[in-house]
Amino acid sequence: MEAIEALTSRVSGSKLVEPAPNELELHSLLSAATRAPDHGRLRPWRFIVLRGDALRRLGDLMADTYRRRDPEATPAQLDKERGKPLRAPLIVVVAAKVNVQSHIPAIEQILSAGAAAENMMVGAFALGYGCAWKTGDAAYDPDIKTALGLAPTDAIVGFMYLGTNATPPEPAPTVDIDEFVREWPA
């Protein structure tokens, strides 16, 4: 698939099932991710790969942190939270390891990790896989960051759910770019 076609036709994955990208394909996706713009060559991106039992352990951790945030959470709410990581056969957590000593602003380091996540997402689409970029409260929870080996100053920019779409996702509606673009000065 050509780059412009992948960029202009990409849609988020729907229900994601096996197979997930194999080791060679995952390596390609991670390599594409590290080609993201990177002011100062800080290489702030970090990628944490989860599959199999690691998905279940993440689900348990997500339920535990949900319970901590909401002590009155119902069993149904906790089960829903616990099941979130099981919505795909593979998750890559994309984080920014923010170098607070650098003259490069933290926001630029986080944006670089976001661009890495986008590269991974478009690459997965180009390879024929589905990818859904998820965040939610878990992405900002300090206990989840710690469990994943991240520092409090680091930022999880997304949980990239990867797999094969169980059914083809609906094409995204066409966007009229004129609604979002203007020349300056007007």
Image (cartoon, rainbow, N blue to C red):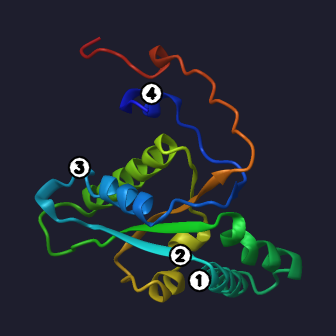
C-alpha distance separating marks 1 and 2: 5 Å
N-term mark: 4 or 2: 4
Residue at x 70% of width, y 71% of height = 86
Quadrant holding the N terminus: top left
Q: Nearer the viewer, residue 70 or 159?
A: 159
**Mark 2 highlights which residue?**
50
Q: Are marks 1 and 2 in contact (CB under 8 Å)?
A: yes
Q: Mark 1 and 4 residues: CB-CB less than 8 Å, in contact?
A: no
Whether pointer 4 and pointer 2 mark residues with C-beta atoms closer than 8 Å, the reply is no
Element on which disc 3 rests? loop
Disc 3 residue type (three-letter): Pro
Say which residue label 4 marks.
Answer: 5
Residue appearing at x 48%, y 49% in the figure: 124
At which x and y percent is residue 182? 36, 16
Query: x%, y% of residue 164?
Result: 64, 52
User: Which mark is in front, 4 or 3?
Assistant: 4
Classify mark 2: helix, strand or loop.
strand
Find disc 1 in the rendering and name its residue: 54
Foreground of the two, 50 or 59: 50
Q: CA distance from mark 4 to mark 2?
A: 29 Å
The three-letter code of the residue at mark 4 reads Glu
